[in-house]
Amino acid sequence: MKMTQHPDLVRDCIMQIAPADAAAMTAAQHRLDHLTKPQGSLGQLERLIVRLAGSTAHAMPQVQQPVILLCAADHGIAVAGVSAYPQAVTAQMVLNFLAGGAAISVLAQATNARLIVVDAGVVGDLPDHPDLHRLHIRQGTANFATEPAMTLAEAHVAVLAGISLAQAAHADGMDMLLVGEMGIGNTTAAAALTSALTGAPPTQTVGRGTGIDDARLVHKQALVAQALQRVGLGDGQRWTGDALVLLAEVGGLELAVLVGAMLAAAAQRIPILLDGYITTAAALVAARLAPQLPVHLIAAHCSAEPGHALALAELGLTADNAAAPLLQLDLRLGEGSGAALALPLIQHALRLLHRMATFESAGVSTA
């Protein structure tokens, strides 16, 4: 991959992303081992805490100002009949987010997380709203089964917008980035990206999304296969070129914004809490650009979409790497809902780290 193909700000973020801090991880583990409990008895929570220490480079990490970045955009592939819902639902759901009636709206309020709603490329004219960030790049992408979803220049603009949004949130105190999305047709884009970046066939990466029937599932798989062939990928082949070129070919505008936001967050050692399949597909692109990025990722859950587990495995977010998804609830809603559900678990884990007594301070014998 030629870094010179990317805007300076993208290259700068990539270069700033550091590996996990080993000293912070060791210190966090040392404290965990001396808390008033049997060593390792908090199971996956202990591994989560150590991972957060490595990401933040702090032995005592905290999450007090989480931000949910919810990006919405439409996809030209939707006109080919890949969803059980019409494309108009994207804009309607953005209005629902802003009115506080969506699942993520409820969860953001319940967890005291700041919700940032972004119109990354919704078809139609949304009304002005103080809580809506409108990017004005283009209204929806093209049908990527037959032509590039967007130009590389448009992908760059969307990625840069994501960087700017995350940097602004960081300046306001953000200490964890939760990522979410909305867009009819975006599980098809996620499947195309996952197949291209893992080599898995569409039969393994394409799922039912909004709840399509068997006939439409086969049709959706065929469209992804057609898109892969269009960009020169045969069976089992992985994309070896510029990840942003691939994103422009078969991705989506909301995915591109999320890629930029993840790069910017990781560059500032801000942990990133992934939601479902679509956000994980965006993380695959970001990780191809910045190989150090996965140490800053936390998987909130593994969704019911079949390609999600493949994408998580590609990122090393598995039990084998002490980074298993935190929840297993068969979710497939998106919006960042799974990430918002996992957020209190993370905060409780960190409260244990900070507030539990050690054997020494409590006068508890270890003999």
Image (cartoon, rainbow, N blue to C red):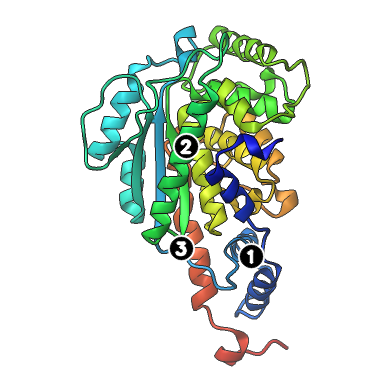
Seen in the picture, residue 353 relative to 222 is either above or below; the reply is below
- Disc 1 to disc 3, how far (Cα)? 14 Å
What is the quadrant of residue 360 in the picture? Answer: bottom right
Of the residues shown, which amino acid type is indicated by label 1? Val
| Residue located at (39% from left, 53% from top) | 169
Quarter of the image with the C terminus is bottom right
**Which residue bears the numbered disc 3?**
63
| Residue located at (60% from left, 67% from top) | 57
Q: Dot 3, how many residues are within 10 Å of its Cα: few (below 14), some (14-19), or many (20+)?
A: some
Residue depth check, mark 1 versus mark 2: number of the one nearer the observer? 2
Q: Dot 2, how many residues are within 10 Å of its Cα: few (below 14), some (14-19), or many (20+)?
A: many
Seen in the picture, residue 79 relative to 209 is either above or below; the reply is above
Is 186 in front, or is 40? 186
What is the quadrant of residue 234 in the picture? Answer: top right
Circles 1 and 2: CB atoms closer than 8 Å: no
Residue 59, percent from left and from top:
60, 73
Residue found at the far bottom of this picture: 363
| Residue located at (59% from left, 93% from top) | 363
Of the residues shown, which amino acid type is indicated by label 2? Val
Residue 177, percent from left and from top:
47, 51
Q: Earlier in the sequence, mark 1 or mark 2?
A: 1
Q: Earlier in the sequence, mark 1 or mark 3?
A: 1
Seen in the picture, residue 303 relative to 60 is either above or below; the reply is above
- Disc 1 to disc 2, how far (Cα)? 29 Å
What is the quadrant of residue 91 in the picture? Answer: top left
Residue 274, percent from left and from top:
53, 44
Residue depth check, mark 2 versus mark 3: number of the one nearer the observer? 2
**Which residue bears the numbered disc 1?**
50
Of the residues shown, which amino acid type is indicated by label 3? Val
Residue 339, percent from left and from top:
48, 46
**Which residue bears the numbered disc 2?**
257
Q: Answer left or right for 258 relative to 308.
A: left
